[in-house]
Image (cartoon, helix red, strand yellow):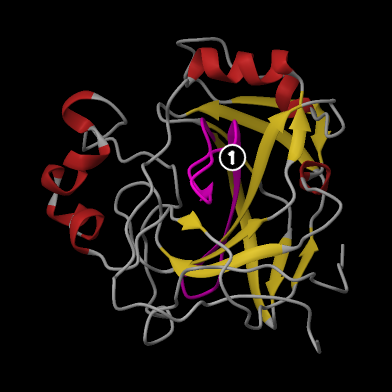
Amino acid sequence: MRYPTILTVLLAACAPASPPSTTPTTETPAASPDASHEWGYMGPGAPTEWASLSPEFADCAQGQFQSPIDLRPIAMADVDMLDTRYQPDVLRIVDNGHTVQVNHNAQSTLMVGDHEFRLLQYHLHSPSEHTESGARHQLELHLVHQDEHGNYAVVAVFIDEGPDDHDSPLWHHLPQRGDHDAHVFEGEPVDPTTLLPSSLTHYQYHGSLTTPPCTETVTWNVLATPITMSADHIAEFRTLYAANARPVQPRPQWCLAPHLVGEPGA
């Protein structure tokens, strides 16, 4: 679905001095677990300890463009338009030990400007990982896309309590606590478009995966308009993961230029 305009959105963050690497990579998408390392959100494997768990996780501590960040409106700049070309797919859902994830096999794509990414999966965090002027939303949905070189583009959707205007089979087939088997519901097609707000006005910046290995090859597109879900649906997810959000990460003090803003041609 094409959204022809992007309204003014402001961002206090900056892009790396050079574009993200286009070197092919085999690293896993955000929120996909690496069974060889016991990382998590509490205890010995908490986010402050990720870098110590494996040399592969060094960016979690040493990276300069880590995610998530606090989004603060300060200045204007151009952004890449988003064009979602999503297709319905059968529901393939799994509790992977870090979140509830839906694996997407249909040929769904996202255009970020003129750059194409393919949708791989989407998953949830509680509370939101990104903040807006220090405030968190109740949940955050990440739709994870990858290009042919292994770089990522993530569309992040804030979720707040309210009417079930974006009801989806996803919310009706959350795994039971302790069930880590993958489940496929052939008769329950899911269209990822139904999980998006009507406006794709967004914050945009270059950052990292929010889970190990915290690789800094991600173009983040954080939608400014939340969707709403019922208190029951939010509570049901939180019985599985009440706190699976990485803390907000600092940006370099010398990084003053905002990456983002507004309406093309304005």
Q: Residue at x 44, y 75 (%)?
A: 14
For the record, the magenta segment spans 125-153
Which residue was labeled with disc 1? 140
Closest to the observer, 234 or 251: 251
Q: Secondary structure at mark 1?
A: strand
Classify residue 159 as left or right of residue 65: right
Q: Is residue 161 magenta?
A: no
**Residue 64 spot, x, y in % from top left:** 28, 68
Classify residue 176 as left or right of residue 62: right
Closest to the observer, 71 or 227: 71
**Residue 171 spot, x, y in % from top left:** 72, 23
Label 1 is placed on what type of residue?
A: Glu
Classify residue 126 as left or right of residue 43: right
Q: Is residue 146 magenta?
A: yes
Q: Quadrant of the N terminus?
A: bottom right
Q: Quadrant of the C terminus?
A: bottom right
Q: How many marks?
A: 1
Classify residue 91 as left or right of residue 154: right
Closest to the observer, 34 or 44: 44
